[in-house]
Amino acid sequence: MSDLPEESFVAQKTYAQKTFTVSEDDIERSWWVVDAEGQNLGRLATRIATILRGKHKPTYSPHLDVGDYVIVINCEKIAVTGNKLNDKVYYRHSQYPGGLKQVTLGDQLDKFPERVIEAAVRGMLPKNALGRKMFRKLKVHAGPTHPHEAQQPKPLEL
């Protein structure tokens, strides 16, 4: 180092880098409507979870809820592969001894088809307060109509 002139060690001028962080006031949310008829359950749930989280936006930030609203219609006509209608089982417990309840995917689709998509999407969202906030933006309806026409949802092609 002694061979080099002293001027070569002059610090170069640096400029501060500014990272853009979106604030709650800057977040713009859209409404999307998805027709679940004939769609594969897992692939549909993955796409919905991505939109609810906001990962499709360039302003995505993991610590903020920047996602959009999603309306799912015709959820009773969802498609599953293999023998999942009989083999896939949903469990719940009443917190009383012997209170384990179980219902197959086929029975759940007959009685409460909305819960099938809700359970699939909930499992793909974060397991914390932010995930619960994201999940509230999901609106699932069994039939072809929904009461959210005032929000002018755009159709989402999958």
Image: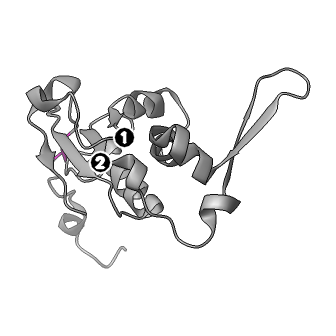
Front residue of 94 and 59: 94
- Mark 1: give few (<14), some (14-19) or many (20+) Cα within 10 Å: some
Q: Residue at x 42, y 64 (%)?
A: 40
Q: Residue at x 59, y 53 (%)?
A: 106
Position in image of residue 99 (x %, y %): 83, 27
Position in image of residue 80 (x %, y %): 50, 65
Q: Is residue 25 above or below residue 115?
A: above
Residue 65 image-quadrant placement: top left
Q: Residue at x 49, y 26 (%)?
A: 129
- Mark 2: give few (<14), some (14-19) or many (20+) Cα within 10 Å: many
Residue 4 image-quadrant placement: bottom left
CA distance separating discs 2 and 1? 20 Å
Residue at the right extreme, as displayed? 97
Residue at the bottom extreme, as displayed? 3
Mark positioned earlier in the residue sequence (2 or 1): 2
Magenta-tinted stretch? 16-20
Q: Which residue does the numbered mark 2 point to in the structure image?
A: 51
> Is residue 8 left or right of 100 when viewed as pictured?
left
Badge 2 marks a residue whose secondary structure is: helix
Q: Is residue 12 above or below residue 51?
A: below
Question: In terms of secondary structure, what is the magenta stretch mainly?
Answer: loop
Q: Amino acid at mark 1?
A: Ala
| Res. 95 in view | yes
Q: Quadrant of the C terminus?
A: bottom left
Position in image of residue 108 (x %, y %): 58, 44
Q: Which residue does the numbered mark 1 point to in the structure image?
A: 142
Q: Amino acid at mark 2?
A: Ile
